[in-house]
Amino acid sequence: MRHFNPFFRFGRLAALATIVAVSFSACNTDDDDDTPPDSSGGTPTPQINAGHGTLVAAKTVTTIDPGFGVPPQDIDYGIGVAVFFNGTDYQTYISGGDVTCEDEALSQFDNGTYSTYSQTSTTGLDFSGDPSWTVSGNGDIPAFTHTADRGFPGISKITSPDVVTRSAGYTVTFQGNMSNTDSVIWVVGSKQFATTVAMNSRTFTADELSDLTAGAGNIIQVAAYNLDSAVYGGKTFYFINEKVVTKTVTVE
């Protein structure tokens, strides 16, 4: 496994059909059309404060329990996100020209971030194989094509209870064993933690959960990812393949 955690800072991306990174400086503009709505609570993903770009391909699986006797439903969605830097300032994003992931054009927003939120497929990008990226280049960002060939992490749906009791702590579990994973981001409600090794469960203590907001509609997420890098035009770019499983819970 290859761990680049000294360069990471963790943020939240809007999940499913809508995505833009808060850690990637979500758009601050009066034009609502430039800011994708967050319809699902977000998908956690790392940003790498190194090199000249981070390109993320993420498979999301959200388990929703509609109630009324209807069995829980799994909603799969594929998303792509890219950000580019000048190599020293990791708070400002620059243009890399036109960007595609799996031949789907990413939209670029006023703050410089790219995402596939605006594409119209009900299932998002098709990541049946390794994600393929194309960047046309702009200024200091060279043109390149790249296939992120490490595959996606292996992780299945969350099996933890539907109720989180803050005073008792809570263990996040999922079906099977995690595989092909460098690092993991664990989320319970508004709490987010990172581990730089694959883990098959994560226990949150009562202290860690003490300031969660009580009520229904909170989320649990396990975001497993692997990471690799490549050099194009003398610039280093990082490629993340991520799988995120999500379910909603009630916090008491």
Image (cartoon, rainbow, N blue to C red):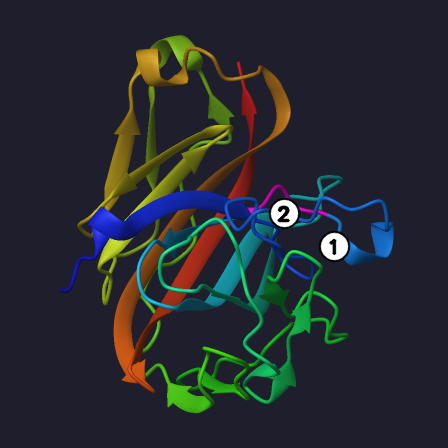
Residue 113 inside the magenta-drawn segment: no
Mark 1, residue position: 36
| Count of all numbered marks drawn on residues in the image | 2
Type of residue at label 1?
A: Pro
Q: Residues within 10 Å of mark 1 (few under 14, many from 20)?
A: some
Determine the residue positioned at 28% across, 56% down: 176
Q: Magenta segment, which residues?
A: 38-42
Towards the viewer: 162 or 207: 207
Q: Give residue 64's position: percent from left, percent from top.
A: 63, 47
Which of discs 1 and 2 lies nearer the camera? The answer is 2
Question: Quarter-wise, where is residue 209 in the image?
Answer: top left
Q: Which mark is residue 54?
A: none
Residue 134: % across, % down: 50, 88
> Looking at the figure, which quarter contains the N terminus?
bottom left
The residue indicated by pointer 2 is 26
**For this rendering, which residue is in front, 56 or 213?**
56
